Amino acid sequence: MSTLPPSHPFDDDKLKEECGVFGAIGVTDAASFIALGLHALQHRGQEAGGIVTHDTEAGFQSARRFGYVRDNFTSQKVMETLPGSIGIGHVRYSTAGNKGNTAIRDVQPFFGEFAMGGAAIAHNGNITNADALRRELIERGSIFQSSSDSECIIHLMARSLQRNIPERMKDALRRVEGAFSVVAMTRTKLIGVRDPRGVRPLVLGKVGDKGYVLASETCALDIIGAEFVREIEPGEMVVISNDGKLTSSKPFEQKPSRFCIFEHVYFSRPDSILEGRSVYETRRQIGVELAKEAPVEADLVCPVPDSGTPAAIGYAFESGIPYGMGIIRNQYMGRTFIEPSEQIRNMGVRLKLNVNRALIRDKRIILVDDSVVRGTTTRKIKDMLLDAGAAEVHFRIASPPTMWPCFYGVDTPDRDKLLAAQMSVEEMREHLGVDSLEFISLDGLYRAAGAANGRNSDNPQYCDACFSGEYPVTPTDMIAKGFELKTAAE
Ligand code: SF4
């Protein structure tokens, strides 16, 4: 039986975060910490996961598997093969260039043996000049093992003339464009780096006196009882040795921070803290802003679970309209149908979501969702509500129209598949067949994320390229493939 998590029509209409990373040093049994941390980060990637550890006797050991962390990294048999007090791990959806066709050799962490010893790396983000780098590296003799953009980092490190691994990493990452939050390890050191714009998150936690962990989100610290220390800053590299000593440097040319605003809207878990703000509170505030910007007379505010829930709570609070669970999510569906038959597949969204008929009958419903990507799910949910007797259906969306693809580590359909790239909001409303459809404005979203005066259009505080088309880092490879920018990037 396949161990791959099932793809599902419902999930196909969501943007997908492509990776989560975790690293630990100075703890007994690092692999167990990493497995728990990756389990908490599973929402960032469900296709596959991997762990590398180092132990003085066993050396470097690794395990890479398709499927969920809980199915692969809980068995004693696997965990016994990963001894040591230092290690890193990775969960992935699938990185650029090989969607839906992943081989185990594409599963991170990647490992390289250098003159001064081995090193492993795990990468969250996307390298926007990976094709160009790969071509150059192959011409100079590098032999790639995978189709992943992240492997370029190992080969660039191999070509560096620096004498230690952290310095080689700096050399390598200075050649890399795009978004990266990297955790890496040597026999004695744990390394964490964020790209100069800090597009993807990375946080530092402490365990006991000498133990440290690095994780994509704070929810992965909570699960192991680690104390949150701080975020790794944009453009910062931290190197932590096994005696608990931490050094920090800023090896890149400094750039204005452009953290991904979609992390606040959807990708990160609501119990994580990003930029000092509760993700849940930002999402609730998005609902407040939405209610101010797009009020409508109705009887009930309902979320599309689970990601629309905090915004729906905020919308209900601000509008004074009662909140209710008009749609119930079946949490266990994905586990039941490992390989759904065609007939089951055609049931589509009903496999995961069901209408609470008794609550919504004859009511005017405001339905709050995080985003509209292709619009296929939105239509089906509207049909379900009308079938169940809703009097009116009004959609309120907790992000601006998604009109542009992401090139920084999030799986987005091409522009011609993004509904908002093809239609005006009114055309979308008609296409979806809802009574009204409104999206939060970019300014409203920025206010909800803590920018009191909204978006600074001369120097935006976040990456919002999937809404604005303004890419903070030139997507070099995509331009070479014919992608047309709306505005010039840096
Ligand atoms: S393009 Fe969108 S999803 Fe991608 S990093 Fe920017 S804000 Fe995030």
Image (spheres, helix red, strand yellow):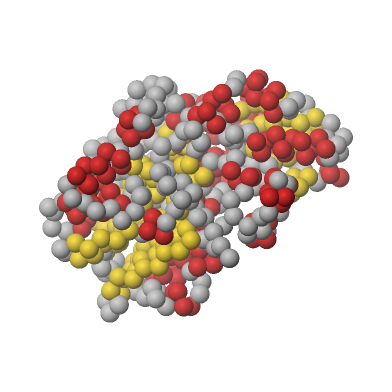
Q: Residue at x 56, y 57 (%)?
A: 5
Residue 266 point in image, percent of width and height: 55, 42
Image quarter of the C terminus = top left
| In the displayed structure image, the side of residue 189 where residue 92 appears, left or right | right
Q: Quadrant of ligand 1?
A: top left
Image quarter of the N terminus = bottom right
Q: Residue at x 39, y 24 (%)?
A: 485
| In the displayed structure image, the side of residue 488 where residue 67 appears, left or right | right
**Which of the pair 392/47 is nearer the observer?**
47
Residue 383 point in image, percent of width and height: 76, 36
**Which of the pair 105/185 is nearer the observer?**
105
Vertical position of residue 175 compared to residue 80: above or below: above
Vertical position of residue 184 compared to residue 384: above or below: below
Residue 137 point in image, percent of width and height: 21, 46
Q: Residue furthest front?
A: 342
Vertical position of residue 339 compared to residue 415: above or below: below
Residue 61 picture quarter:
bottom left
**Which of the pair 210/306 is nearer the observer?**
306
| In the displayed structure image, the side of residue 390 where residue 440 appears, left or right | left
Q: Is residue 226 visible?
A: no
Q: Residue at x 54, y 59 (%)?
A: 4
Residue 49 picture quarter:
bottom left
Residue 371 point in image, percent of width and height: 59, 36
